[in-house]
Image: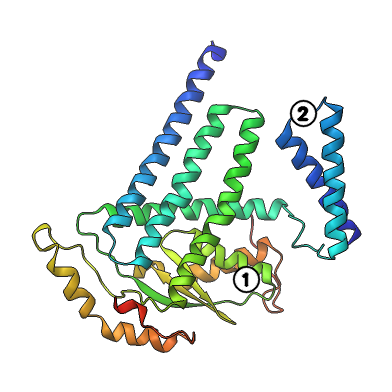
Amino acid sequence: MIAEFLPVAQMLIASVLMLAGVFFVIAGAIGVIRLPDFYTRMHAAGVTDTLGAELIIFGLIVQAGISQTSLKLVFIAFFLFLTSPTATHAVVGAAWQSGLKPKLGKYKAPAPGEAKAKPKTKSKATPPAKSKTKSKRKSPVKTTRTKK
Amino acid sequence: MKRSALVLLVLLAGYWLALSGYLDNPVLLSVGAISVVLVVAMVWRMGIIDTETVPYIHGKSLGYFAWMFVQITKSNIDVVKAVLSPDMEISPKLTKVPLPHSTDLGRVTFANSITLTPGTVSVEMQDDVILVHALLASMTDQKAFADMGERAAWAVSDPMSGKAAPQKDSK
């Protein structure tokens, strides 16, 4: 009785885990599109990197059962755990070094009608925050590229 | 150094066996053994064997991973909520977080942990602070950072600038 039920439960748990992972991947993708600037977009990409990918791999581990495949998947999950923040930090650090300034302060999504107008006024309204971050930076690279 | 080399030898052999799965093919087994010994000999000759070369996973770091996973899940849900809400009210913020760790491994573990939790990314490491970019202002709680820093230091046995490592139970 239990032996008959076990494969069904295995498939069920695996599907639930993978579907949850897919949800987080899609949410991360939506975030990358909706968020206003590079730095905030990295946070949304982080959702895909961490919980999205890990949940899908956990689902695959459950599906594979105790086997060599699941051991390899455990290794993949572990290395993803270590490398994805390093990659994120490298990308963000490169943006910071080259002088890209983050938008700071409160931000609200523009209403559907004013989608074009609002972001422009927002980016002009934040010079105090910009100058603040500039004084914090000690990198010698001058910020000419961000104007484009 | 001898002990680290031995640990590396055992780990590499186990890794090769686990990934290849060929346990009864003498040709492949001996080729694997040769490559493992060759790698350890090369690392030995280069003189780069130390605790950083040898991946050391013990109970403490596993406990830290478990704790981190809970934190990641929590902050993931926060970020997804903020991103999917129609208004998408966010408040990006830059903060400086003190970095009291004294070993490189402790510093990297802490900075990586900050980046690993979505919503906070470590932008730049300075001598004793990390510049952190947060998606929501509520995520820049200094106490939460300090707690994470203590746990990271505990997981890699970092003395935290001479201070005694705090006693935390591994959840």
Q: Quadrant of the N terminus of chain A?
A: top right
Decide: is B136 above or below B12. below
Residues marked 2 and 1, same chain: yes
Estimate how packed mark 1 is, as few (under 14), some (14 to 19) or many (20 or more) residues with alpha carbons within 10 Å: many
- Furthest toward the right, the residue is B2
> Which residue, given by chain and number where applicable, does mark 2 sit on?
B22
Against B58, is B155 above or below? below
Q: Is residue B117 visible?
A: yes
Q: Residue at x 59, y 44 (%)?
A: A76
Label 1's element? helix
Q: Secondary structure at mark 2?
A: loop
Residue under pointer 1: B107
- Residue located at (31% from left, 83% from top): A129
Quadrant in the picture for the C terminus of chain A: bottom left
First in sequence: mark 2 vs mark 1: 2
Image location (x, y in percent) of residue A77: 57, 45
> To which chain does the residue with label 2 belong?
B
Q: Where is residue B77 shown, x and y percent of the image? A: 38, 52
Amino acid on which disc 2 is placed: Tyr
Q: CA distance from mark 2 to mark 1?
A: 39 Å
Q: Is residue A48 left or right of residue A10?
A: left
Kindly identify the amino acid type of the residue bearing the numbered disc 1.
Arg
B21 displayed left or right of A72: right
Crowding at label 2, few (<14), some or many (≥20) Cα neighbours within 10 Å? few
Looking at the rendered image, the disc whose residue lies closer to the viewer, 2 or 1, is 2
Q: Is residue B42 above or below residue B91?
A: above
**In which quadrant of the rendered view does residue A86 lie?**
bottom right
As rendered, which of B28 and B11 lies closer to the eye?
A: B28
Residue drawn at (87%, 60%), measured in percent from left and top?
B44
